[in-house]
Amino acid sequence: MLNSNDRRNSPFHRILADITGQIERADLRPGDALPTRVDLAKQYDVARATVDKALAELSRSGLIDSGKGRRTVVLGKNPTADSVTTIGVLWNWPEDQERQGGDYLDLLFRGIREACAEYLLEVHFRSAPLHTWTELVNVKGAQGLLIVRPDYADATIIESIHAAGVPVVLVPGVLDESPAASISSDNAAGTESAVQHLHELGHQDIGFVGLTATVPDHFERLMAFLEMTGARKMVVRPEWICLSHERNPAKFRDRLAEWLTPDHFPTAVVSSDFMMTLAVLGRLRDLGLSVPNDVSVVTFDDPITAAQMHPSLTAVAQSVPRLGYRAIQRLREVISGEDVPHVDRLATTLVVRESTAPARR
């Protein structure tokens, strides 16, 4: 029978002590890969089962991420929420889009800054391709990353950030297959409220205008529009669906010129983006069409200017600052190792104003 000293000197405990010590001394850092299980078994001259048992214990302790079929990487010791001090915010918007669609970012960043001030966090903002995330972590010392409005094409690099042991949260935008937690508005409920409102006003020919479907929020709004109109037995005419693959708001109006013509327009339009809504209104003016007498318009997003326009805009309001604030709360929880929901949805509200009226044809 082994005494306590024998147990402490057993191969199992030796592996535990060695790897734990390397992590505590920062010889192994978060994201570093451990040797393979076969190599560890050779290094310690033990059976593979002993290595598996040691790695399982290190994984339970939150020091490593280890699983069958995956490489084993260092997570480091999970800090408490109170010990989170530095985070990074990364987004990759084209320059024209960022300049002309800046109101959204300003509101989102306001919520992020408010949360960082409350929790005494140092925050580093970076507008750059997502593959530059290592600079925020390795140079700025970010303990976790907030990725702003990722594209579906970004899923692979987000997975690589997660695999490196770096906590990451997405805002807004839900990537269902991504391991990263995300914060987003309830796009389906918001779209349903817009469709229901227009349906109650007697509209049957309703158009949808949105950005490229590679952006998660806009894809969700498109899918919800198709589902909600179908549920109300409204015929969706393909010609009334307009998706712009152009990210520059200054060019939205050019895209709409191909869609709306003097004798070809729906009785109502749901727009999934405020900048696109402005382009819709401009195109309707070009055609001599009146809002809401000829065409009713509902916009997604409710900035201050929506209520001040003539006519004032009926809008699906989402609290953009609250999205940013909640994202920081969630990132602190992820960094500290707490269990968090994969998707966190914030409610939307339909604000009815002058841009919608009963259908006249």
Image (tube, rainbow, N blue to C red):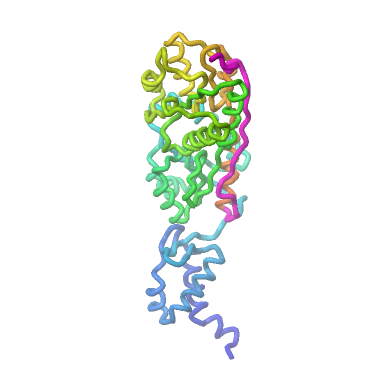
The answer to whether 282 is drawn above or below residue 131 in the figure is above
The answer to whether 189 is drawn above or below residue 308 in the figure is below
Which corner quadrant holds the N terminus? Answer: bottom right
Q: Residue furthest bottom?
A: 1
Where is residue 126? Give x, y as percent. Answer: 44, 38
**From which residue to which does the magenta span run?**
336-361
Where is residue 249? Give x, y as percent. Answer: 41, 24
The answer to whether 148 is drawn above or below residue 70 in the figure is above
Q: Is residue 352 magenta?
A: yes
Look at the image and tell me whether residue 113 can be seen: no
Left or right: 347, with 35 as reference point: right
Look at the image and tell me whether residue 133 can be seen: yes
Identify the residue at image location x=52%, y=32%.
Answer: 225
Most common SS among magenta residues: loop
Identify the residue at image location x=62%, y=18%.
Answer: 353
Left or right: 242, with 194 as reference point: left
Left or right: 249, with 314 as reference point: left
Identify the residue at image location x=48%, y=16%.
Answer: 281
Where is residue 52? Give x, y as percent. Answer: 48, 74
Identify the residue at image location x=42%, y=13%.
Answer: 263
